[in-house]
Amino acid sequence: MKWFSYHCPSCGDFDVDAIAEDTITCRCGRTAKRKYQIAVQKSSLGNTARWDPVVGAYVENDAQFRSLLHKGRDEESERLNKDVKLVEVDARDQEGMAELHGHSLSERQETIDKSNAAKAR
């Protein structure tokens, strides 16, 4: 027998057997929406190893990446003899990326426009 999960704004989550509808009427009379869930086994996700240009090394997982990132930060702090802070920048943040690479925002936009024009050809 299959069980399906639903969420009612008043009653919360509950399970119902043998009903596979997008919405159903809850026992309180309100509309309950079906909750779609999947279960993923981490072992089935495959290998997460990759070359990462930020740390300049092949990393097996996120923990190793972060370890190498902090090691680089500590080495740079020692070399400069002052604290170095790590800041994550979203690649979609054009202002942050321009600052990261030492360009003005207009220079970065010009480079993006040239790249898009080259792709269009």
Image (spheres, helix red, strand yellow):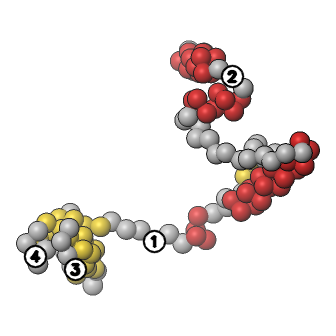
Q: Which mark is residue 31?
A: none
Q: Residue furthest bottom?
A: 1
* Image quadrant in which the C terminus is located: top right
- Mark 2 to mark 3 CA distance (whole Å): 58 Å
**Residue of label 4:** 28
- Tell me the kind of residue under disc 1: Ala
Question: Which type of secondary structure does the marked residue at label 1 adopt?
Answer: loop
Q: Residues within 10 Å of mark 1 (few under 14, many from 20)?
A: few
- Residue that appears at 60% across and 21% down: 105
Mark nearest the camera among 2 and 3 is: 2
Question: Which type of secondary structure does the marked residue at label 2 adopt?
Answer: loop
Q: Residue furthest left?
A: 29
- Tell me the kind of residue under disc 2: His
Closer to the N terminus: mark 3 or mark 4?
Answer: 3
**Residue of label 1:** 39
Front-lying residue, 64 or 16 = 64
Mark nearest the camera among 3 and 4 is: 4
Q: Is residue 46 visible?
A: yes
Front-lying residue, 6 or 50 = 6
- Residue that appears at 27% across and 75% down: 13
Taking 115 as reference, is 9 above or below it?
A: below
- Tell me the kind of residue under disc 3: Val
Contact, CB < 8 Å: mark 1 with mark 3? no
**Residue of label 2:** 103
Q: Residues within 10 Å of mark 3 (few under 14, many from 20)?
A: few
Q: Is residue 72 visible?
A: no
